[in-house]
Image (tube, rainbow, N blue to C red):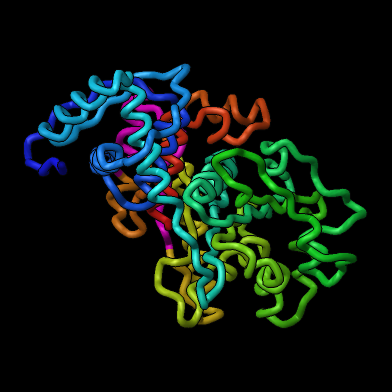
């Protein structure tokens, strides 16, 4: 018999395997359901099951709690007892039932193509690369196909994910931008491994020939050719992905112009679908760097008659223990209003350890605070 829902809820306290708990958290957020409602639906499905359910491996389980309707929980406990089934096994089976009934949504290709996100600021050391990688990983967890483009010739994104620069005498993104290509750009794309990414996350590695890009683009006479080279080079890949993330170089040259032009709002595209994410730190030099970037964005929009959406600031590497300078600077960023601060990412060891081990953050520390911050940012963008 179905148990009616009431406003009164009791706390479910049990233990779950970390992988199952993580999957529940990500899936619930992706489909827009509260965890307590997902568990409630799972318990209802468990009670209505007409055949024995597979046993869930609960070894290594850790504490988990949420709230479900009181009457439903009482009936569920009684059913587990009658079946001589461990309570945590019953909860695990219920959650698995809910997950199986709510797979990752099919991501239909947009008529206006992949969404294009540049992560950029002319100041180095603000965490552009770490945020590009983390956001890309979180989007892939949500079921999107994601290409991360290492557009910085220093190649930190490439190195952090365990790869080498592309050979200087071989093919590269820059060569495709300057008409010197000797192959297909798709042949340079590498998968980024991780069970939660489901084969949906990819990297276009950097090449040190990027240090010459501004000089080469400067030789072009027509202004629009200087700014459209990146778009033309990436166009053959755009139909294969839901998101194209550009890890920008710390400069204000033609390379940055190309990245900004690439993420402009195109005709027929909803405002905010593509645009620029600006990593900053809670200190004055980031504000000075942003002022220069702002001038570049405004000049490009005026010169080429385009709109570039500011998706927001991410205040990165934040450590409240450093006192007034950081806290007051954070308030200054928030006081700007538009673009808004969409996230504050604390300075923790997880990211540094992931970089050191050349492992994706959401693989190295998938349950950590920084991983959850990347997921929150991804949901804001998606």
Magenta segment includes 233: no
Estimate the x, y position of residue 181 in percent, counting from the top left.
86, 67
Q: Residue at x 51, y 58 (%)?
A: 293
Relative side of 48 to 132, left or right? left
Q: Which residues are magenta?
A: 310-331
Q: Quadrant of residue 322?
A: top left
Image mark count: 0
Q: Residue at x 45, y 42 (%)?
A: 374
Estimate the x, y position of residue 367 in percent, counting from the top left.
45, 29
Q: Quadrant of the N terminus?
A: top left
Estimate the x, y position of residue 380 in percent, counting from the top left.
38, 53
Vertical placement of residue 91 versus 285, above or below: above
Q: Nearer the viewer, residue 200 or 96?
A: 96
Q: Residue furthest front?
A: 51
Estimate the x, y position of residue 33 in percent, counting from the top left.
29, 48
Q: Nearer the viewer, residue 262 or 337?
A: 262
Vertical placement of residue 94 versus 132, above or below: above
Relative side of 18 to 46, left or right? right
Q: Can the viewer see residue 286?
A: yes
Q: Residue at x 35, y 46 (%)?
A: 29
Vertical placement of residue 15 versus 217, above or below: above
Relative side of 174 to 90, left or right? right
Relative side of 361 to 273, left or right? right
Q: Quadrant of residue 23?
A: top left
Vertical placement of residue 200 versus 224, above or below: above
Q: Quadrant of the C terminus?
A: bottom left
Magenta segment includes 327: yes
Q: Residue at x 41, y 37 (%)?
A: 372
Q: Residue furthest right?
A: 169
């Amino acid at each position: 018999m179905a148990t009616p829902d009431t406003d009164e809820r009791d706390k479910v306290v049990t233990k779950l395997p970390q992988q199952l708990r993580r999957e529940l958290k990500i899936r619930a957020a992706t489909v827009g359901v509260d965890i307590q409602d997902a568990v409630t639906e799972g318990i209802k499905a468990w009670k209505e099951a007409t055949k024995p359910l597979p046993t869930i491996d609960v070894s290594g389980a850790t504490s988990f709690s949420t709230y479900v309707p009181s009457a439903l929980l009482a009936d569920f406990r009684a059913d587990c007892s009658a079946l001589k089934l461990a309570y945590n096994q019953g909860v695990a089976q219920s959650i698995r039932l809910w997950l199986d009934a709510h797979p990752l949504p099919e991501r239909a290709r947009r008529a206006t193509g992949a969404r294009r996100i540049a992560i950029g600021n002319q100041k180095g050391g603000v965490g552009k690369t770490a945020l590009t990688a983390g956001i890309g990983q979180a989007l892939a967890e949500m079921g999107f196909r994601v290409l991360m483009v290492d557009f910085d010739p220093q190649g930190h994104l490439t190195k952090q994910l365990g790869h080498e620069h592309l050979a200087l005498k071989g093919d590269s993104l820059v060569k495709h931008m300057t008409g010197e290509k000797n192959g297909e750009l798709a042949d340079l794309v590498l998968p980024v491994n991780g069970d939660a990414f489901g084969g949906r996350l990819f990297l276009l590695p950097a090449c040190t020939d990027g240090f010459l890009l501004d000089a080469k683009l400067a030789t072009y006479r027509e202004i629009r050719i200087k700014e459209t080279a990146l778009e033309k080079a990436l166009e053959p890949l755009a139909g294969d992905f839901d998101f194209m993330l550009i890890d920008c170089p710390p400069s204000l040259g033609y390379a940055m112009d190309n990245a900004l032009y690439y993420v402009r709002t195109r005709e027929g595209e909803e405002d905010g679908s593509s645009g620029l994410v600006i990593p900053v730190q809670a200190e004055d030099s980031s504000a000075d760097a942003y002022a220069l970037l702002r001038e570049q964005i405004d000049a490009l929009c005026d010169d080429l008659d385009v709109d570039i959406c500011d998706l927001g600031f991410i205040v990165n590497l934040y450590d409240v223990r450093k006192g007034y300078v950081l806290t007051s600077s954070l308030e200054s960023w928030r006081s700007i209003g538009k673009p808004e601060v969409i996230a504050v990412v604390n300075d923790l060891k997880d990211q540094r350890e992931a970089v050191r081990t050349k492992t994706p953050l959401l693989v190295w520390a998938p349950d950590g605070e920084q991983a959850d911050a990347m997921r929150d940012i991804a949901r804001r963008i998606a």
